[in-house]
Image (cartoon, rainbow, N blue to C red):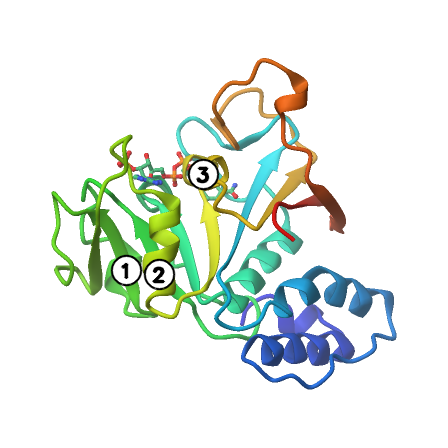
Amino acid sequence: MEGEAASLAPEEKRIWQALIARRRGDDTPLPVPASPEASVLLDLYGPVCQVPRGRPFALAHLGQSLDGRIATNSGASRWLTGEADLLHTHRLRALADAVLVGAGTVRHDDPQLTVRRCTGANPVRVVIDAERRLPPGHRVFQDGAAPTLVLAAADVARSGERLGEAEIMALPRDRDGGLAPAAIRAALAARGLSFLFVEGGGVTISRFLAAGALDRLQLTVAPLLLGSGRPSLALPEIAELREGLRPRMRRFSLGADMLYESILHE
Ligand SMILES: NC(=O)c1ccc[n+]([C@@H]2O[C@H](COP(=O)([O-])OP(=O)(O)OC[C@H]3O[C@@H](n4cnc5c(N)ncnc54)[C@H](OP(=O)(O)O)[C@@H]3O)[C@@H](O)[C@H]2O)c1
């Protein structure tokens, strides 16, 4: 735990422990918050912690600039959003059964995808690499910090093969040649991984969103203009504004950043 212990008040720590316990199936009523900070914690994480264990649920999160970029064109994205959003990302990992990223994120960031800034267990790590292009040297495939799955197309891989320490799961291609988000969710749910946190990048989350495979989408917007770089969301083109999505929204301040949560399925 690197960031949370020093900065959190005892009440917030207590509430975080209660939220984690709720996710594990403890149905003791959540504490009544006394401070505004504790109240925000309950407000932000309470709804996802109330999702019954075993019910399929997918939440995606991206940190982006004001002009909708998640990284520079060369792939630099650390740290686009601030400390509070970083802690938030670790909390989402701690609440989820599985954290999923696309091959681009592993290629550029070599992330660990573990819980280090708050208390909580590491989720199962899942990487989509349909073509099996990633080499075995990346940290998620070598460090053994949590079970790790690589989702690959069934014509280039067989289930049960290994990539470093990770296990390959072969899935059929969809009509576009990729892996269908609904099939990914079903395959993970069949392994007991029902709460899925889709951590990025933009291409992966856009595919889940376009397929209607997300229950919640969180965009944390940093007060920063990049003017170029990798896009956050990119969906099939529409002609009329009314064709855009207008979900119910919730907003939270995260330090200097603003988190916008879209509730796509109630
Ligand atoms: N700001 C943030 O919150 C944040 C979060 C995460 C990452 N990032 C940054 O974002 C950048 C990477 O994002 P990105 O959008 O370029 O890439 P990405 O979403 O990480 O990975 C996209 C790639 O993953 C594979 N993939 C994803 N979904 C698939 C599907 N349904 N079926 C088949 N293949 C699928 C494809 O790999 P192939 O093309 O190889 O087949 C695809 O090109 C990095 O620079 C990283 O630093 C930022």
Instruction: Name the residue carrying label 2.
Output: 188
Residue nearest the observer in this picture, 173 or 10: 173
Query: The residue under label 2 is which amino acid type?
Result: Leu
* Res. 19 image quadrant: bottom right
Residue 64 shown left or right of residue 196 in the figure = right
Q: From the image, state whether disc 2 or disc 1 is nearer to you.
A: 2
Ligand 1 within 8 Å, label 1 CB: no
Query: The residue under label 3 is which amino acid type?
Result: Ala
Residue at coordinates 71% horizontally, 60% vertically from top-left?
44
Instruction: Name the residue carrying label 3.
Output: 211
Q: Residues within 10 Å of mark 2 (few under 14, many from 20)?
A: many
* Res. 243 image quadrant: top right
Q: Secondary structure at mark 2?
A: helix
Residue at coordinates 76% horizontally, 62% vertically from top-left?
43
Residues at discs 2 and 3 in contact (Cβ within 8 Å): no
Residue at coordinates 49% horizontally, 27% vertically from top-left?
235
Instruction: Name the residue carrying label 1.
Output: 149
Q: Quadrant of ligand 1?
A: top left
Residue sticking out furthest to the top: 239
Label 1 or label 3, whichever comes before in sequence order: 1
Which percent across, then down, holds residue 76?
Answer: 45, 36
> On the rendered image, what quadrant is the N terminus found in?
bottom right
Q: Secondary structure at mark 1?
A: strand
